[in-house]
Amino acid sequence: MAASSRAQVLRLYRALLRESQRFGGYNYRMYAIRRIRDAFRENKNIKDAEKIEELVNKAKANLEVIHRQV
Amino acid sequence: PQDPRVLDSMLPYLTAYYGNPHSRTHAYGWESEAAMEKARRQVADLIGADSREIIFTSGATESNNMAIKGVARFYKSRKKHIITTQTEHKCVLDSCRFLETEGFRVTYLPVKKSGLIDLKELEAAFQPDTSLVSVMTVNNEIGVKQPIRDIGEICRAHKVFFHTDAAQAIGKIPMDVNDMKIDLMSISGHKIYGPKGVGAIYVRRRPRVRLEPLQSGGGQERGLRSGTVPTPLAVGLGAACEVAQKEMEYDHKRISQLAERLVTKIMCEVPDVVMNGDREHRYPGCINLSFAYVEGESLLMALKDVALSSGSACTSASLEPSYVLRAIGTDEDLAHSSIRFGIGRFTTEEEVDYTVQKCIQHVKRLREMSPLWEMVQDGIDLKSIKWTQH
């Protein structure tokens, strides 16, 4: 499986933020945007490939969750 | 509000997977049962328990009723005494009052001005036939956090069961039933951003705590709580617990910052504001402030576009000042002017700033109109006034 490149992670980040903007509820929208930003910022220096893949999968799952609810 | 991740986990069980988890004979039942057991494990993990020790209920009120009435009635042949505090949730106090009519004796421990109980008074209250001690972890009106670990030690030493209503504490501060020597714990779904209408009770198995069940029926939930377990709600509760565990640190840090911001801003701008409850031993997300010389209800009406309360949801209908505030020794007039601010995972900085600004604005306006404020400004001591009787 191709290693998660910087470009892929950034694409995920943008997709997550874009999808979160579609939340109707103010509190959900603000929470989602804030949490996504903080989570990506917190993990920006991780180098371990396995950990990165795990985080990327989690992000993809969360994207699905948001998508189902907006 | 419910966390979107919780809703997501519940969706399949509200649509396609509609089986009854207690049906043993078909796949619909098996998959619902699997989901229910997974949820049970998630709840247990949050508090350091075994999943067999978790029973799903309809909420913390039912859990509290089960714990207090259940334990008391089971041991009633030999033990007839219960200890609790004056600041407990209404359902606990009401259950105790009900038990008193059944012939039990209850000691309602007073609290110090800070809202914390006095451990020495607790020690003194034990009697040879005490069966249960019930103290809530975090108070829902003033946010005060009781010394649960110490209370657990004392109860263990006296061989008395320790129940705690942890509805406001679970998922917000770390709880461990073994570390804190807790024998029974009430959990509420909607306090941790899960669905309303579900909760759980933790009942220790080693040493075994016996309960007389409140609800008779088909023997579900180890015979302690009969009735079909609401799979989607239970799944939601489990997911809420798992999310809470992951987000605990992040949420706590953020909520503490927002709470600090709210209190500091208000106290800087407006004099004569009292925070009810201990400053240190508290959960930051529940703040109760008393604004002297201002009527609480008028302030609430003025701030009607913010979701606030004077007291808690379960007592908001009554006009009496809160019994919790009276128990911590607040003066009548300050008790009437108290407002509870709740800050949670989804509260934004903007909302806090808006609330602060509106609050300051209206407190100043109401004080301008208040004759008491005028008198205080002129240096009159309000306690020395003799009000005429009509």
Image (spheres, coloured by chain):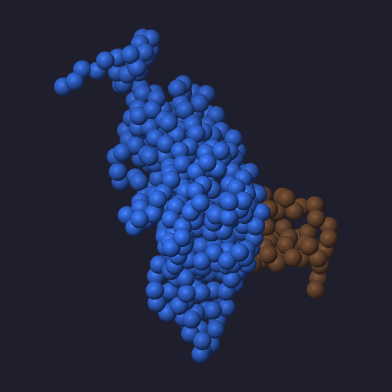
- Residue with the most extreme left position: B390
Give percent across and percent down for residue A15: 64, 60
The chain assigned the colour brown in the figure is: A
Give percent across and percent down for residue A6: 78, 59
Q: Colour of chain B?
A: blue
Work out whether B62 lies above or below B125.
Answer: below
Which residue occupies 33% across, 13% down?
B384
Res A62 seen here = no
Work out whether B381 lies above or below B166.
Answer: above
Q: Nearer the viewer, residue B226 or B117?
A: B117
Res A53 seen here = yes
Q: Nearer the viewer, residue B285 or B366?
A: B285
Which residue occupies 48% across, 54% down?
B129
Work out whether B38 lies above or below B91.
Answer: below
Give percent across and percent down for residue B98: 34, 55
Quarter in which the C terminus of chain B is drawn: top left
Give percent across and percent down for residue B17: 50, 79
- Residue with the most extreme bottom position: B25
Which residue occupies 72% across, 64% down?
A56
Q: Nearer the viewer, residue B302 or B193?
A: B193
Which residue occupies 51% across, 74% down?
B222
